Image (cartoon, coloured by chain):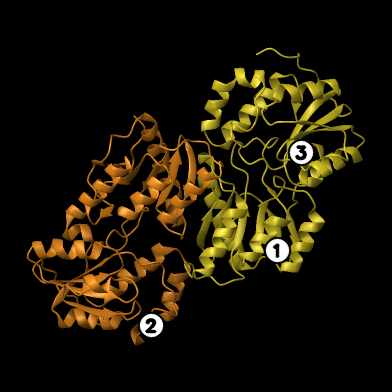
Chain colours: A orange, B yellow
C-alpha cells in the first residue's frame, strides 16, 4: 500500500489524538500538553463531545474518513497518532467511508466480521501504513493507567480477593475468544460475562438478577473484574473505567472493582475515587495473574 | 448421616420423579410408564404445573422439604429417584426447609454460595444418603436425549459450522468456572455468554444487540450452542431445550441451535422440530469436541 514514507518519531512532534466519547481524550490531551507537546484532536463525529473538543485545536471527521484524518495530521505536522475514548462498534453504513477506506472495504469487512481484536489490529496496521507511529495512551501519559494497589475504599477482604482471583482466571480462559473484558463474580459464583453489550450493561444484569432473587449473594458482595484480552493491542484498546462504571457497580450492590494495574485507563482518578468512596466501593489495581493469598 | 440403608435398585420398582417446571417431567413420566414402571411425581410447589401433575400419582412439597419428599418416596415403594424440569435457583427463604434440611443448612449454605454445580452435587449426595439411587432421565428414557444429527431445518452451512466449533471451544474453556451452559456465536463473534439469567435471557440480549446495531452480523446468521459443563452430574442437571428456546432464537434472528448430542434433553422432539421448521431454524445434535470440517 502506498502512502508517505515512515518518519522517525520524536517526542516533540505534535500528537494527533483520534477522539471517541467520554473524558479520556481530554485527559490524554491535557497530559500531553503538560509535557510540552502540541496536540491536535481528530474528533469522531457521533462520539467525541463537541463542547469539550472546542477547547483544543481540532478537526472533525467521520469514523470511516481515515484519509481525511491522516491528511489533517500530516498538515499539522503530527508524526504520532493515538486512539482513545469509547467507540461502540459503528455501523458500516454510518461511518461514511472515504475513498481509501472504500478501496479497503473487502479487507475491512473481513476484519469486521471477527471480534473487536481483528478490527482494531486492522486499524493499527492502516495507520502505520500511512507512515505514522501509533502510540498508546499510557506511553504518552503513564499516569492515565490505574496503578497497583487501592485507588478508593477499604481493602478487599478475603472473600473479595477470592472473587477477584476467580474472575481473573475466567478472563484468562475466555481471552482467546475475543469477547468482553469484564466479568462479575460474587461469593465464588460468576454472575455475568461481558459480551458486545459492554461493561455497564453486564453490571446492570447483575442488579436485575439480584432484584429477581435469581442469585443469592447479598448486596455488598461481588466484584467487577476487568482485564485486557491476551494479545490485545494496548495502543488501541485498553479497558477503561469511569464514574459511570462505579455508579453501575454501586447500583448492582457490588463490593468493588478490580482492574489490571498498568493496563486499565482512567480519565479522572480523583473523581473515580470520590464517587467510589461515597458509594463505599473499593477500586483496586491488581496483577493480571493475581491468585488468592 | 443416618437414613435408611441403601437398597439395591431394580428397574421394576416405582420411580419417584422430583418435578420442576416445563414439560420434561411429564415426558419422563410417560416414557417410564411406557416401559411398565410405576411412577410417583414429587411435585415442587412453585415450579411444577399443577394441572398436568394432577394426571399422575403425585405428592406436593416445597423444594426444601427433602425429608417429606423422601418419606413419600419410601411409602410408595420407590427405590429410584430422578430430578427433572426447570428450577430457577430458589431463594433460601422460599423453599421452606424441613428439619433435616435445616440441620444441614450450614453445609447447604456453603454449597449454595458456589455455582450451580456445587448445589446439585450436594443434592445428589443427600438423596443417596437417604438410601435411594439417583437416576438420570436419559438412563430411564434415552429417547429424551437429542440424538446426533439434524433434528429440524436445513443442515448448518460452513459458516454455521465454524460458529458451532467456536462456541463449543468457548464452552470447554468456561466449563471449569461453573457458569452457563450456552453461548451465542455469529460469524465468528461471540455475542452472548449465558450467566445465571438463563438461556432465554441470554438469547434475548442478542436480539437487543441486533436491534441497537451493536453487532453487525445480519439476521439469519448465528448459532445458539448448548453443552453440559465438564464434570456436571448428568443425573441432576442436563441442559434442555424446548419450544421457548427455539422461539427466542428465532426472535434473535439466529440460523439455528446446536446442542451436544446424548446429553441435552428435549421433552417433545416433534414439537421442537415443527416450531423450528416453521421459523426456518436448524436444530442439530453435535459431538462435544466437534471442530470445523
Mark 1, other Cα within 10 Å: few <14 / some 14–19 / many ≥20: many
Q: Is residue A250 above or below residue B161?
A: above
For this view, does B170 lie left or right of residue B120?
left
On the image, numbered disc 2 is attached to which residue? A96
Disc 1 + disc 3, Cβ < 8 Å: no
Q: Are marks 1 and 3 on the same chain?
A: yes
Q: Is residue B132 above or below residue A206?
A: above
Q: List the single residue furthest toward the bottom.
A: A99
Quadrant of residue A106 in the image? bottom left
Which of marks 3 and 1 precedes in the sequence? 3
Relative to the observer, which residue lies in front, A12 or B155?
A12
For mark 2, name the chain: A
How far across and down, in percent of the image, does residue B204 sit? Answer: 58, 59
Q: In the image, what residue occupies the spot 65% across and 60% down? A: B248
In this view, the mark in front (1 or 2): 2
Q: In the image, what residue occupies the spot 21% across and 82% down? A: A72
For this view, does A163 lie left or right of residue A271?
right
On the image, numbered disc 3 is attached to which residue? B137
On the image, numbered disc 1 is attached to which residue? B282
In this view, the mark in front (2 or 3): 2
How far across and down, in percent of the image, does residue B275 sit? Answer: 76, 62
How far across and down, in percent of the image, does residue B210 sit? Answer: 53, 68
Amino acid at each position: 500500500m502506498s502512502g508517505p514514507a515512515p518518519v522517525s518519531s520524536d517526542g516533540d512532534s505534535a500528537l494527533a489524538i483520534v477522539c471517541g466519547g467520554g473524558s479520556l481524550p481530554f485527559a490524554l490531551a491535557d497530559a500531553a500538553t503538560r509535557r510540552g507537546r502540541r496536540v491536535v484532536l481528530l474528533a469522531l463525529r457521533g462520539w467525541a463531545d463537541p463542547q469539550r473538543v472546542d477547547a483544543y485545536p481540532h478537526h472533525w471527521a467521520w469514523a470511516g474518513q481515515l484519509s481525511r484524518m491522516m491528511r489533517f495530521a500530516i498538515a499539522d505536522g503530527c508524526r504520532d497518532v493515538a486512539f482513545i475514548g469509547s467507540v461502540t462498534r459503528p455501523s458500516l453504513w454510518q461511518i461514511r467511508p472515504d475513498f481509501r477506506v472504500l478501496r479497503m472495504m473487502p479487507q475491512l469487512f473481513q476484519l469486521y466480521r471477527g471480534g473487536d481484536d481483528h478490527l482494531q489490529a486492522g486499524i493499527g496496521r492502516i495507520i502505520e501504513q500511512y507512515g505514522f507511529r501509533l502510540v498508546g495512551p499510557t506511553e504518552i501519559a503513564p499516569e492515565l493507567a490505574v496503578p497497583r494497589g487501592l485507588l478508593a475504599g477499604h481493602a478487599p477482604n478475603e472473600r473479595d480477593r477470592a472473587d477477584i482471583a476467580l474472575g481473573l482466571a475466567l478472563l484468562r480462559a475466555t481471552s482467546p475468544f475475543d469477547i468482553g473484558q469484564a466479568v462479575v463474580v460474587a461469593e465464588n459464583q460468576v454472575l455475568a460475562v461481558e459480551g458486545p453489550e459492554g461493561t455497564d450493561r453486564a453490571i446492570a444484569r447483575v442488579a436485575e438478577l439480584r432484584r429477581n432473587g435469581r442469585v443469592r449473594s447479598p448486596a455488598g458482595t461481588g466484584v467487577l473484574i476487568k482485564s485486557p484480552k491476551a494479545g490485545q493491542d494496548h495502543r488501541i484498546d485498553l479497558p477503561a473505567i469511569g464514574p459511570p462504571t462505579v455508579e453501575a457497580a454501586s447500583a448492582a450492590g457490588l463490593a468493588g472493582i478490580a482492574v489490571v494495574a498498568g493496563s486499565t485507563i482512567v480519565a479522572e482518578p480523583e473523581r473515580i475515587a470520590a464517587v467510589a468512596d461515597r458509594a463505599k466501593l473499593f477500586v483496586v489495581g491488581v496483577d493480571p495473574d493475581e491468585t488468592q493469598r
